[in-house]
Amino acid sequence: MNFLNELNDNQRVAAEHIYGAAMVIAGAGSGKTRVLTYRIAHMMENGIDPFNILALTFTNKAAKEMTERISNISGGHEAKNITMGTFHSVFSKILRFNSDRIGFPSNFTIYDTQDSRSLIKDIIKGFNLDDKAYKPSQVFGRISTAKNNLISPEAYNDNPDIKLEDKQSRRPEMGRIYTSYMNRCQRSGAMDFDDLLYYTNVLLRDFPDVLHYYQHKFKYILVDEYQDTNFAQYLIIKQLAAAYENICVVGDDAQSIYSFRGANIENILNFKKDYPDFSLFKLEQNYRSTKNIVEAANSVIKNNKDQIYKKVWTDNQVGEKIEVIRTLTDNEEGRAISSKIFDKQKLGGTYNDFAILYRTNRQSRSFEESLRKLNIPYKVYGGLSFYQRKEIKDLLAYFRLSANPNDEEALKRVINYPRRAIGKTSIEKLIVAANKYSTSIWEIISDFNKYPVDINRGTQSKIGVFVTMIKSFQVEVNEKDAFTLAERIAKASGIMRELVSEKNKGPEEVERFQNIEELLAGIQEFVNSSEDGEVKTLADFMLEVALLTDADQDKPEEKNHVSLMTIHSSKGLEFPNVFLVGLEENLFPSQMALQSRTELEEERRLFYVAVTRAMNSCTISYASSRFLWGQSISCEPSRFLDEIDDAYLSFNTVRKPMGRHGSNQGFPARTGGLNKPLGAAPAGLRSLKEVKRTQQSQGKSEGIVIKVGFDVQHERFGKGKVTNVEGTGPDQKATIFFPHHGSKTILLRFANLEILN
DNA sequence: AACAACGGGCTTTTT
DNA sequence: GCCCGTTGTT
């Protein structure tokens, strides 16, 4: 086969390497994935058994794509015998297979972040601690860090440094919470994301036969995005690779952007300590972007101290300069970018060619609004994922309970949903009892004789009905096909009824119902995907669903829309035209990252990632004022703008569309000027009050003529009839009767009303 | 126990 | 500004 001819010299040497340790430092757009896939194909070509290959990726999507590409080049079905996936998915399977060793059922539940937080909250409450001092999310973060560094609860409690830290941050009970958290997860037969890595380490550490088995199964190991691995992941790899040391890690230290969740850039920098004889390959030619884009990105990233030296370059054309757009407000930023996209798309190409990248999810709003006004199709990635929606989590909780009734978070979620008159007090008593008897709530409610609880007869019998129902699902969870059972649960649980009931007929409820239907359709698809005629059960489905994310659900390329996403989720993607927005101090770089050099450098890497997503054009924007927590604040341009070499930039200030306030103060002087506060009270900038007023009149209903008898459309309540109007100006209110929501009195300046007649 | 009203915190990123 | 959870009300 001559597929290796499709690689450049550097890529080919890296791809042809098979034995021993290797590190590939791959600059942005340098064909990293290509090298990885060709490398694996080449290995198989040389007689290496795919069953002996372990390839770890950062996302499920990347794994899937890589498997496909490998089977395309190698032309066989062999590719699917490679163990390929994310750390979490690969090792969750290994853990299920060996679960008896570590005291978990093989069908253990995987808690998502919500579940973990809710459990932690419970524990804090149970310990009678002040949840102001012990904020669940902070406590969770601390536990997560401990686990990612493989610090067990015992080690945590024994460590004087940690103890001191916790005391100083006035959380002396942290260790107790951590211990209890671990215990209760175990009792519930549940692992959180971090546990998957933590217990994999426990498994490999405490059971030499298991370690031996996987060391010899995975003779060849590849790790993608190595810069984003944490200590727990690093150690798993190190142990597995110890027997053969055929390990190849691929990454780019300049694109390490996940240290906030424990990723350790040291792993890549320290590779040579673990494998002194390693081969180093550098991929420095960028095939993605224009010279201007590559150079602009380089000029910023060179300000980082911690990095492996490399010179990313490209043979592509020079291309347009990076356009920097400045607007007065965030809403104006939305309009400016949207109309740019509108104009540009008319010149050719599809909306798929455009992406708007931002630092924080909340920034999507102004772009959504303005895109919608221009009828430009768009899709917001990230945010609340499908699987985190309330209705989906509710139904999944029933599925989880059917597969693993000890799952306490699932049980708490649905024991009284839909309403069964099992109140908060009863549930609290059950939790206390579970702690007292050191067992799960399920054990208690399935046998009140064995575990007496102070709950009245009536409630006990209501709980009994619930238990009977769950038991009836349980018998089928490994028998019936997933769709049949899922549909039965949706109905029998009362969730369907709840969603179609009379009073719930607003647009939101309809959407919820549709989401449930979508989930069921997905399960149907899952059942249909059965290859060998084997019945795919709901238990099978639940094994996969916990680690799925929206990105994995991404439907085929039928799309024609502008992509809106955070820079984090854009990693690994590319777009012909990138709009990088909100380049302001305290936003990007984030305010939280200004404390230390390492944090600031991570923000800079994030900026580097963002710019290098662009193929042909990159536009950067920032606003002088922005709404934050309902208040307009003034903003300064990001320091990263200053760091881009002027040679690659062109400037543009967008005039306000509403004119009148005049004041286009041109562009700030480049030398030192960019970071001077535009803020305080720059000449001509509208005062805070003015900005506020303008904000209110944009797209809102203030000032429109509205009269009694009008039919109007409200975005939440649907159609309604105006029955009364009072007040004037910003205080104008209307009383509107909505058939499904009753009569509401609404301040017009807040309502987004559409007049229908 | 169920619902409305109020208040507080939040907003960095997510497998 | 908005969401969430808590409080107050019947």
Image: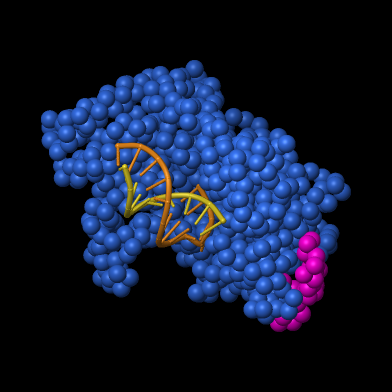
Chain colours: A blue, B orange, C yellow
Residue interval drawn in magenta: A644-673
> Height in image: A484 above or below A262?
above
Quadrant of the image for the C terminus of chain A? top right
Q: Position of residue A689 (x, y in %)?
A: 64, 69
Asked if residue A663 is positioned above or below residue B3 in the image, the reply reads: below
Identified at 50% across, 74% down, the residue is A595
Q: Is residue A657 one of those drawn in magenta?
A: yes
Please tell me which residue is depicted at 85% across the width and 47% down the height of the picture. Answer: A346
Residue A735, percent across and down? 58, 44
**Residue at the image point whose x is 58% and y is 58% from the top:** A360
Q: Is residue A483 magenta?
A: no
- Tell whether A15 sits left or right of A118: right
Quarter of the figure with residue A449: top left
Give the percent coordinates (x, y) of residue A264: 48, 62
Residue A412 lies in quadrant: top left
Q: Quadrant of residue A610?
A: bottom right
Q: From this viewpoint, which residue is outermost toward the top?
A: A533
- The residue sitting at 38% across, 26% down in the picture is A493
- Which of these two is toward me, A363 or A486? A363
Q: Horizontally, is A275 left or right of A75 in the view?
A: left
Name the side, left or right, on which A202 lies relative to A518.
Answer: left
